[in-house]
Image (cartoon, rainbow, N blue to C red):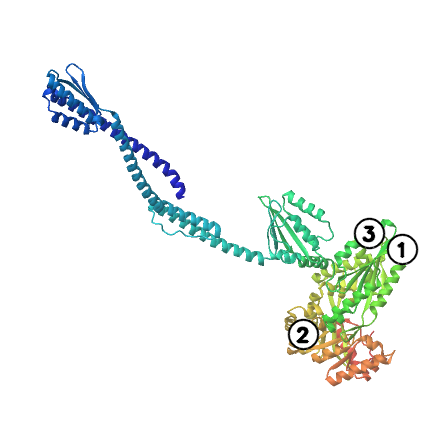
Amino acid sequence: MQRRFLARVLPALAVATASVSLACGGIIYQATWSRILDKQTRLLPALATSLAEPLWGLRYEAVQGLIEGLAADSDITSIVVRDDRGLMIASFGAETATSSAARLRQAIHRNQAHGAEVAGSVTLGVSPKRAWDDALSGLLAGFATALASGLAVLVGVVSVNRSLIVRPLNLLVSGIQKTQRDGAHHRIPDAGAGPEFDQVISAFNAMQDRLEADGRERTKLAHRLDVALTNMAQGIALYGKDGELLLVNQRYRDLLGLPPGLVAPGMSLREVIAVSLKAGIHGQQEAVRVYREQMDICARRQPARYVLELRSQRVISVSHEPLPDGGWVRTYEDITERRRSNEQIVYLARHDALTGLPNRTTFGERLEAALGDLGRGTGFAVLCLDLDRFKEVNDTLGHGVGDALLRTVAERLAACARETDTVARLGGDEFAILQTRLDHPDQATVLAQRLIDTVSAPYELDGHHVGIGLSIGIALAPQDGSAAEALLRNADMALYRAKTDGRGVHRYFEKEMDARLQARRQLEMDLRHAITAQEFELHYQPLLCTRRQRVTGFEALVRWRHPQRGLVRPDEFIPIAEETGMITEIGEWVLRAACLQARAWPEDIKIAVNLSPAQFRKARLVETVMEALAESGLSPGRLELEITETALLNDTEMTLVVLNRLREHGVRIAMDDFGTGYSSLSYLRQFPFDKIKIDKSFVHGIAGGAEAVAIVRAVAGLGISLGVQTTAEGVETPEQLAQVTSEGCTEVQGYLFSPPRPGAETGALIARLNAAAPLGQARAG
């Protein structure tokens, strides 16, 4: 910068010095020439006066002195003396003043001798040479002076420039260069160069401070970005418009299984693809094809998504987003677990979670597909399956054993079917099988019997020996229906028939079944109307004490007097009432009506009322019983509530709580149909029943085998040991009466004494039975 400054200043200084020197020379020349001319003008008159005498009269010494004086004057270049005649007496210059003076002396002596001549005129010669010489000397002197002054000024300017301009500029430049070279920000110290440069340096330092603050902020942001990129769940790869990889995080490498450093910024897309192919990311595809596909995605300049399935079984979702500058960014997300979860969700949506079998939805889809193939000449069968006695196992041994049983049953069913068949679980203990490619109905029969035999085989589950059965209903396509809903409905009706016919069998759909189903539906509608219209009535069957041979009570049995059908048997409508939940309303009415009827009997006659398991699920059962007793005025000790093992199986703990509350109020509790379930004995241990009623199936079997006799004897003996009454149900013959009495039963009930009778006949019935002696002679009429 100093050299550039001098290069500009020195030429200007030379021009200024020359100009000053020329001006000085001109001024000196003009002043000298004017002075010489003025001197000439002043000397000539004086000389003319001095010499205007006869030459002979001039004194030599005076003239000589004059001439010498003039000769000594550097401004006089010549003297010419003439006489009055105009003849030059003498002529000489200042440089020849001595010789001229000698000639003048001679002329004076000569004229003194003649005495006639005088000095007529004197001419002084002057020349500009002296002025030029002086001017030149002045010019040189002026030049030297100007040059010295200019140099002095230049030195001062340079010094000032160096102090006030160059040094601050050098500091400024140095600061910028250091900033460029080091990437760091350097402050410039105060140069003391004046307010202007101080402001510039201050502004520069302020700018540096801002840049440094911005740099620190950018460093923080860069660090945060780096931390975010390193710890983000997605991989990221940023490409420039020319396909160069600009940024990539470690998660990208981790997701794709790439070693560190294998993919790095600066690589081209083609190089990245080559590395990816080598790592097996794109399977067995060729590099050219993959590169073309990738470039096609980039060329479309539209967001895109695609999935990479790696050899490591990892599934990566790639999101491609174009950028405004022509580049693009891709994010990579591991969706392996999400896909598995989705697949699991889809699987569970179409399969049973417990058994893994197809569910109702999948079965329906395959059934529709089979219907679409009916035109190809082969039919198919729909088999609806229901497990017999599963509920008893599930409720007795627990849901864990029940679930294990269902899984094992599913395995057995699947083993019986072909690969082309579909075995599905519809819910609970209900299954269905779609038997395709059916050439003859007998094939369905063979499959059904194989299923029954396989499922009915014993099970060993968690140390328990379990036995169940299987009932099957079969509908054939196309003869039993050409729609999925119709086929399932018809197979279900056939299943209902199979369970009605004794279970453990299979039945084919028959058109008459549909009529029976319609009749059942009509019966359900009529039953709902019967509750509102109070079409029910109670009949009572007596219970007699074997020891006293007297009536001890009655069991209330509900009957339905239908306006058109007449008296409907309980086994026709009670199952429907239990399935639909109407049994709760019917049971409450029976309880109130029976208590009111019993109030008219003698004080020692009890009333027994059956409770449905559904009634135990109501929170107000105890309150309902107490309200019925309060309304009738019947003593709680005269009310005997009969429950079956099924009521205990549904929710043993809650049921026992309710039974204890009832017993605290004085109500008697009897276990009905004892011996038909799995856990009768365990319930006797959990709750102190007042009575045990032996199921009629054991009483009827007394005449046919010792097994039934042993069971009756055991139950009666158990009652004696526990101090509990035992009632033999279904006594129909004197032999049965004698046997159960001899085995120790304390109470009997059955058609041998009386079938159920209307309430109006109970008074006469009590009198007749009490009057009969011995017990059983007053046979029912």
- Element under label 1? loop
Q: Residue at x 11, y 18 (%)?
A: 113
- Element under label 2? helix
Image x and y of residue 379, in percent: 86, 53
10 Å crowding of disc 1: few (<14), some (14-19), many (20+) = few
- In the displayed orientation, state which residue is furthest to the top: 85
For the residue marked with disc 3, what is the amino acid?
A: Leu
The residue labelled by disc 1 is: 439
Label ID, residue 653? 2
Image x and y of residue 610, in percent: 72, 72
Q: Earlier in the sequence, mark 1 or mark 2?
A: 1
- Mark in the foreground, 3 or 2: 3
10 Å crowding of disc 3: few (<14), some (14-19), many (20+) = some
Q: Residue at x 39, y 46 (%)?
A: 169
- In the displayed orientation, state which residue is furthest to the bottom: 721
> Is 563 drawn above or below residue 288 in the view shown?
below
The residue labelled by disc 3 is: 371
- Mark in the foreground, 1 or 2: 1
For the residue marked with disc 1, what is the amino acid?
A: Asp
Observer-nearest of 308 and 740? 308
> Is 140 drawn above or below residue 222 in the view shown?
above
Q: Quadrant of the N terminus?
A: top left
Q: Quadrant of the C terminus?
A: bottom right
Q: Is residue 555 left or right of residue 212?
A: right
Observer-nearest of 228 and 488? 228
